[in-house]
Amino acid sequence: MRKILWSLLLVLGGLSLKAQEINLKLWYNQPAANWNEALPIGNGRMGAMIYGTTGIDQIQLNEETVWSGGPNSNVDPEKASLLPRLVDLFFQGKYQETDDLANAEKLSLNSGMMYQPVGNLWLTFPGHEQVNNYYRELDIANASSKVTYQVGGVTYTREYLASLDNQTIMARLTAGQGGKINCTLGMNCDLRSRIQVEKDSIIRLSGITDDHEGVLGQVRFEALVKPVLKDGALLLSDKQLGIKDATEATIYISIASNFKSYQDISGDGLVRASSILKKALGDDFDAAKAKHEAIYHSYFNRVSIDLGETAAAKLPTDQRVEQFRGGDDPQLVSLYFQFGRYLMISASQPGTQPMNLQGIWNDRVTPPWDSKYTTNINAEMNYWPAELTNLSELHEPFLTMVKELSQSGQETARKLYNARGWVLHHNTDIWRVTGPVDWARSGLWPTGGAWLCQHLWERYLYTGNQDFLKEAYPAMKGAAEFLLDILIEEPTNGWLVIGPSVSPENAYLPKINVGVGNTMDNQLVFDLFSNVIQASEILDTDQAFADSLAAAKDRLPPMQIGQHSQLQEWIKDWDRVDDKHRHVSHLYALYPGNQLSPFRTPKLFEAARNSLVYRGDESTGWSMGWKVNLWARFLDGNHALKMIGDQLSPSLRNERGKESGGTYPNLLDAHPPFQIDGNFGCAAGIAEMLMQSYDGFIYVLPALPDRWQKGQINGLKARGGFEVDLSWEKGQIKTLTVHSSLGGNCRIRVKQPLRPVDGVLLTVAKGGNSNPFYPINEIKDPLISPKARLKGVKLPKTFLYDFQTEAGKSYTFELKK
């Protein structure tokens, strides 16, 4: 049965792959000079960065559970008395005193632990320092990397993959002539470790992670390296292995730790790593590669994209990045979109940990921001493409983390806020800490749980899986219980607001962050309460609790339009037109939220656009990725493409040594330094430019740039269980096919009239959408400053259609002539 399954996956994968005609390779004509030029491979659990250097090659290794510290809670109950004092000071108008008191000292016992590297495998090739015809690639169509070059007329090839099947990282060394593989294998590790060669020709690295901020390092990990030769001989020393005169060598790398869960580190890393290695040795490289590719194709080949190709596509990838903003290279956008999907498949598999700030790739013992999960935007952004780009299963590690945090966060809610339910602030780690880490300007933000729960609800809207919703509901309810308990009455208007809190990392007056009733908090509470109310109705449970949420929701503040015609970020009109902060938190309601709409809330829509104009374009890499999505929701494809150009610009240092946001030569996002969220944010934004499904309908080609006159994309997912295949010419739809997995009404908005190809009844849409997966939660009318000068929103002419679908059937349309 297992052999039949593999054969079927291979056939299906191969057929789908032939349909993708775009060259899906990152390639270079020189080795990586540094980590930001190395190429990432991964299998969800393990990651490696491939340098491809010739004399001495470096494979930098990570394993998802190698974190400093150990199981712990960072909540400090002594800080509980501080929170009401901050609210009182704010309502007295003592804003500086509020902020000073909040930032006087750290608010938790620690600021979370660090994600740490396992180490490096070094391959030394004598006489290979000077080579000819060098070539290096990352093939994202097949999830493998390759290096080729010539020495003395002999072609040498190295192939690398992180197997999704056997859970090892593999490297195969071959040459154009037999008996030419000669090299030395060695390892190093910057953590407490021991390296030795075992009697069965295995290099064994045993390590333990660092202590950090008062928590002892308790993760013990094992890395095993085993070469298997064709011809030749293995030479053993205390810490290295030598390969002499081999025709071929396959190197297997297995890594595991004692981590079992965020509460349990009683595992045996050596037993697990040895078991994984033993099973992997049953397949040679070709067999292992075929199985790996079959699994990978089953995810990757669900979506294909073609935005056109120009001569720029023939250049090495680093040169394309250098020239993109001033040139014409639509295929690089396609490549970058699919690279985002490649990274998700490589870093987030069912049963693994969710992707952190660096995904699974990190070479620093003390990484930037500890490489944790920053939940005031970055962790969520990592998973924006999951449902939309047809990788729903890979959302699972993040959704599992939400459920785990709903457990660990109960202690923080109780001890710090005297509240029911659970709370998460702006950061967490593998140990699922939930206290307000770092300083108040970023950490004192109690609505992280609400944002994470939005992902639970979105998973339901995309899949319609009520079993999943039933499983997710306790976490959603617990987050709502917490917010319901901490809402306080704002004295001037009687609104219910959250405080103390911040609008993530931004200041409302010079260097003053901490306040009450910030716009993003209001939006998050509105969404969570709305979602829990609907979930309780679907599951037929907790009617009294839902009623209490509805009553509280009615008393939330309306959004406000301030004196600069902007969507206010704070409860008072404090926005500055010269504020260029990277966070645009109050625009959550537009994206990834769905409260704002050009059709339903035009004044707020215009005000939100003004806010983004004031904030500017260039920023950190992930912020530019967010702005691609926002400009797509503003229906401005040309500006969204401009943001992609900014995102795909090289990250450079100015005369003062400051590095700009953008993209590194290996296409990884530059915050700077590297943060993977920008890759995922921009990938989601590219999809949003071509198809949106948030405003009661599926909007086809809502933000098509003038430059993308012809193209196609297949396999995008829309809410309600729909899958969309789309092609266009001269900026107009050529064919549109909608596949329905759940049935029900499908409402589409298009800029040109359509006609059905297959006889389905296509009617002009009227009234609300009867499809339950397209709920519209009506918001209050905004409060508008008398100083505001709104000009009105000019919208393109569109056509809104309904047609009824049956589960399992497809429906095709074309331009009506």
Image (spheres, rainbow, N blue to C red):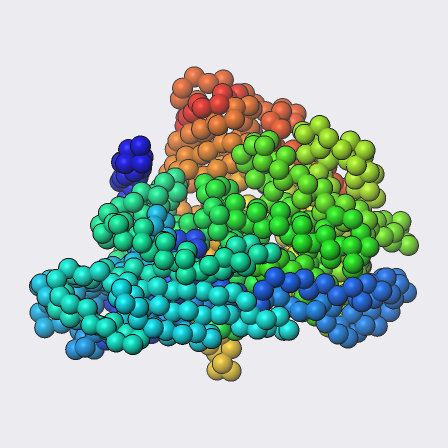
691 to 316, vertically: above or below: above
Task: Name the residue at 79% across, 36% down.
Answer: 545
Residue 98: percent from left, percent from top = 82, 69
Quarter of the image with the C terminus in it: top left
Task: Name the residue at 41% across, 56% down.
Answer: 272
Residue 310: percent from left, percent from top = 30, 53
In the figure, residue 795 lies in which quadrant?
top right
In the displayed image of the protein, which residue is found farthest to the front?
199
Residue 695: percent from left, percent from top = 61, 37
133 to 145, vertically: above or below: below
Nearer-the-camera pick, 314 or 233: 233
Quarter of the image with the N terminus in it: top left
67 to 399, vertically: above or below: below
Is residue 346 shown to the viewer in this render? yes
Task: Name the residue at 42% across, 69% down.
Answer: 206
Is residue 590 shown to the viewer in this render? no
Nearer-the-camera pick, 803 or 430: 430
Residue 551: percent from left, percent from top = 83, 38
Task: Name the residue at 40% across, 22% down.
Answer: 757
Total labels drawn: 0
Nearer-the-camera pick, 366 or 143: 366
